[in-house]
Amino acid sequence: MKLLEGKVAIITGASRGIGKGIAESFVRHGATVAFTYLSSDEKARALEQELSAQGGVAKGFRSDASKYDSAHQLVDDVMAEFGKIDIVVNNAGITRDNLLMRMTEEQWDEIMEINLKSAFNLTKAVIKPMLKARSGSIVNMSSVVGVKGNGGQANYAASKAGMIGFTKSVAAELGSRNIRCNAIAPGFIETEMTGALDEKVVQGWRDAIPLKRGGTTEDVANLTVFLASDMSAYITGQVINVDGGMLM
């Protein structure tokens, strides 16, 4: 039996990179996937077809999870379409890197709204159906930067550190109702974004990692599948690094 057979999952930010890798793995493991998108209906339909071609069920929902009402509408729409929500993956996130002395208020606020407030909005929206079902798994995407900090990323690091505190608090509040909440902290994951960087710089990062390679989206997706599945039924409130040993 597939690990996520019969489960319905919402994944935010699934159009590319880590989010897309998670959506692909979820479908392979039998989950029905509801993913969010903001801009292109055409790209969303293409992703639906791509995921469905793997033998699963996937549907895109136009939604801005950083907006409170939009997140609640998303949950209503997914419940109306599929009847339940077993899993939420709060993956939506952006970067607006800058040294603190040059960082604008807008760069700070945008990161907090998209990276952190979105997790609050969607988690709060999904609590009611999960409480009614007395079951659920929430997986929040943090970062090793949220654990150790990083120069030029004060806003991003703060948002990802906030995700860790939020995760632990949700786990403490909802554990008695059999709702679990865990966080994943990816390290250097190679995606289409890193593919545009200078190869010598990227190789330098790889060389500094004990496993001597960057991670793949599948590395992160594999852990997400585990945390979403019943195999991790006694795991909650944890932050697990997927970083090749970077933060040993």
Image (cartoon, rainbow, N blue to C red):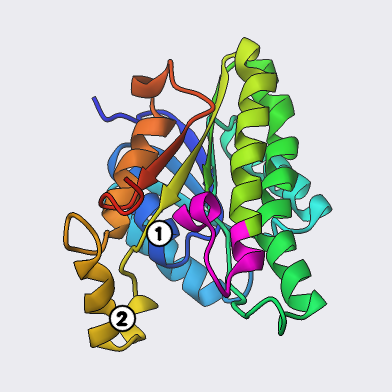
Q: Which residues are magenta?
A: 142-157
Q: Secondary structure at mark 1?
A: helix
- First-in-chain label (2 vs 1): 1
Determine which quarter of the picture holds residue 126: top right
- Expressed as whole percent of the image width and height from the top left, the position of residue 100 reads 69, 76
Number of the label disc, if any, that sits on residue 53? none
Above or below, 35 relative to 164: below
Above or below, comparing residue 150 to residue 30 in the picture: below
Residue 215 as seen in the image, left or right of residue 157: left
In the displayed structure, would residue 107 be above or below residue 113?
below
Is residue 151 a member of the stretch shown in magenta?
yes
Q: Quadrant of the C terminus?
A: top left
What type is the residue that disc 2 sits on? Gly
Q: Which residue is mark 1?
A: 18
Q: Can you identify the residue that label 2 sits on?
A: 195
- What amino acid type should be assigned to the residue bearing mark 1? Ile
Q: Is residue 27 visible?
A: no
Q: Quadrant of residue 3?
A: top left
Q: Residue at x 35, y 57 (%)?
A: 21
Foreground residue among 19 and 220: 220
Residue 124 horizontal side relative to residue 53, left or right: right
Q: Is residue 39 rendered to the left or right of residue 101?
A: left
Looking at the image, which residue sits at the far top? 176
**Which circle, 2 or 1, is nearer the viewer?**
2
Q: Nearer the viewer, residue 191 or 83?
A: 191
